[in-house]
Structure formats: structure tokens, C-alpha cells
Amino acid sequence: MTHATDQRLEVAMGKMLRIGVTVAAIVVFVGGVIYLCQAGGPLPDYSHFHGASAAGDHFGPVFSGAFHFESKSLIEFGILLLIATPICRVLFGVVGFFLLKDWFYTAVSTLVLTVLLVSFFVRR
Amino acid sequence: MNTLYFSMAICITSILAGFLGALTGLGGGVVIVPVLCLLFKVNLHYAIGASLVSVIATSSGAAAAYVRDGYSNIRIGMFLEVATTLGALLGAYLVAKVSADWIGIVFGAVLLYSAWASLRHVETALPSKEEDTLAARLNLRGAYPVRGVKVQYTADHVPAGFGIMFVAGTLSGLLGIGSGAVKVLAMDQVMKLPFKVSTTTSNFMIGVTAAASAGVYLSRGYILPDLAMPVMLGVLAGSLVGSRALIVAKVRTLRWVFAIVIVALGAEMIFNGLTGRL
């Protein structure tokens, strides 16, 4: 019986992952098309590391840029959506195991979610 | 070369990497990083940043298909993700502390191991007779379909498997790859889980592991949107086609070709690392 409900949780997670990746890929693709249409002049220098950009620390400019269809911000917004997808899956796990009254795995999922959020909000 | 041609060339290479990665089960990241560094002369940090993004995309994209078949085990996956995400944090932290040359050498070693692992004859490990009490207490068990019949299994050697998963996570965070080969090693060979369960659960875990280092990568500026864009879209498209082709293609010859390519890339990464060219 638990297996049947486990299976439902897994299918829900799978669906969520697919939707997240599809939406993220579309956003990145649109941003990419705009970027390539506007791209002119010499190739950016990729062979040297330039250090962190200001946008690395603040997601605000990314959101407002994406809203104004600024190409790089749009791509970055898509990448953020993509990264959020597996994090949402873990959140699904927390809720799902809680509903299954599996307290141990509710705690395990919460621990994983905490590690993920720490990696995002504790910078450097 | 202008931006349009450069992006196109990277996209086509990424499609190929994703396709072969899915066919051989090694994932696209393990090839795309050395190709970006060696062929396109991209800085190693930018290459692993772009690769990590593509790893999240392929893992999440493929998981939906595996879940339906009932092979992956969410409890075992979630439990081991504690180890892989903590390892990934350590790995991502180490990227800034270790020189690019050393990262290249470790990368080369992982490539050589992956080539060997992909050719190795896979024996289905037999679980031990006695049930592992720790695994039973942690509920690390399940049932998977074999020709329509549900077969029960329980994990073995939980602490060792957990430890190797931490290493897999560290490699993932340090190199921007999914490190699926090491994850499968932990589950299939050490924890004695059925091969199908190991590969599908590993795939499920790769996205979460990569997400743990992505936060650190973003804040350090390793992820360049304009470079990550063609890599992510290319690898994703290639792997979706590759996982469909898996059913019809004769994989044996391809596996050999791919293994030789990987050995060559691994050797060149080690050589470039040793001579300080990365």
C-alpha cells in the first residue's frame, strides 16, 4: 500500500521536473535568440576568468532585466528557473513524506532542502 | 569567429556530447568540459559553470521518463542526497581554492575512470543473505519490476555507500559534472542495489546534487549566461534524442568509440594540467 502512494509521489515529482525544465529551456531559448540577433562585433573573451559579476549577488537586476526582454537577463532568469526545479522536487519530498506520515524521511528531505538553501543564501 | 558562429559551433558540439552521453550513460558534462577547454579555449571555470547548468537540465529532463517505469527509489535517493549535496558544497568551495591545473588533473582522472567504468562488464551484484539492520531501520529498500514480477531488494553497506556518495558530490561540485559513474558505483557495487535501480536513482539525484553547487557557482560568476545558453540547449536536445535512440541503436561499437574519445580527452587534460596550461 505504501508502495502505491510512493509511486504517486514519484510520478508527481517527475511531472514537476519535466514542466520546470521545459519552461526553463523555452526562456533560455528566447533569450538566446534575442542575444544572437543583437550580437555584433568581436567575440567576448571567454579564455580568461573575469571574476564575479554584480548580478551574481543580486537577483533583482536579473528579474527586472528579464521583464524588459534584456537578452542576458532573460537567459539568466531561465537558468535560475532551471536550478529551482530540483530544489522544488526536494520541497515536494518534504510535503509528500509528511502527507505519508513518514517522519524520518520528512526530516531527511528537510535536511537536503536546508543544504540547498544554505548554498544559495550564504554567499562565498 | 563572430558570436553567432561561435554559439552555433558550441551548440552543435553540445548536441553531440549530449547524444553520446545519453547513449553511454555517462552524461554530457563529462565530455563538454574538456571539449570547451581544449578545443574552444574556454576558461576552465566558465566551462564547468556551463556544464553544471546542462547537467541539471538533462537530469531533470530524463527523470520524468524513468519515474514512470518504477525503477527509481525516492527514499534511497533522498537519503543519499544528504551526502551528495554536502559533498557538492565542499567541491564548489574548493574550486576557488584549488588551481585550474589541479582541477584539470582530477578531471582527467575521472575521465579515465569513466571510460573504464563504461566498458566494464556489468555483473549484477547479489545481495547478501542477511538483511542489513541499518538499511532496514532507515527503510532503504523497495521492489522493482522484473518481467512483470515485483522483486524485493534492500541496501547493503550503507555507511560505505554514503561515504562514496559524499565523494561523488565533491567531484560534481569541483568539476561541474553529474558524476553519475561514481554514484552508480556506490549504489550498484557497494550497496548492492539492482543495476536498473542504481542508474535511474542516480539520474534522479544528479540534478539535486548539481543544484547545491549552482548557488555557489552563480555568486562566484562561473556561470556566464551567453556561454551556458548554447551548452544547455545543445546537451538537453542531444540527450533527449540519445535516450530515445538507446532502444534501437547498437551500443557496443559506439561505447568503444566514446571510450577512446574520453581516454584521449582525459590524457590531454592531465597533460595540460601537469604542464600548467589550463
Image (cartoon, coloured by chain):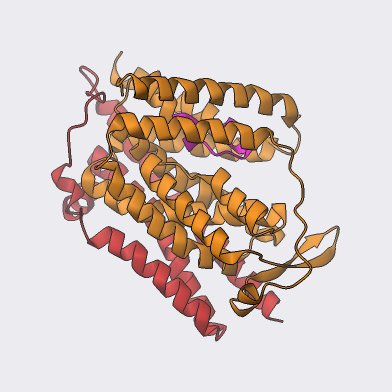
Chain colours: A red, B orange
Taking the magenta stretch, the answer to whether it contains residue B12 is no
User: Above or below — where is B177 with respect to A88?
Assistant: above
> Is residue B159 left or right of B212 when viewed as pictured?
right
In the image, B249 versus A29, the foreground residue is: B249
Q: Is residue B184 left or right of residue B278?
A: right
Specify the quadrant of the image occupied by residue A85: bottom left
Q: Is residue B174 left or right of residue B203?
A: left
Q: Which residues are magenta?
A: B19-32
Q: Percent x, y for residue B155?
A: 66, 66
- Magenta stretch: helix, strand or loop mostly: helix
- Any part of residue B129 in sight: yes
Q: Quadrant of residue B40?
A: top left
Q: Measuring from the top left, give residue A66's x and y in whole percent.
A: 25, 48
Residue A41 on image: x %, y %: 20, 17
Instruction: Residue at 70% x, 62% y: name it.
Output: B70
Percent x, y for residue B184?
61, 50
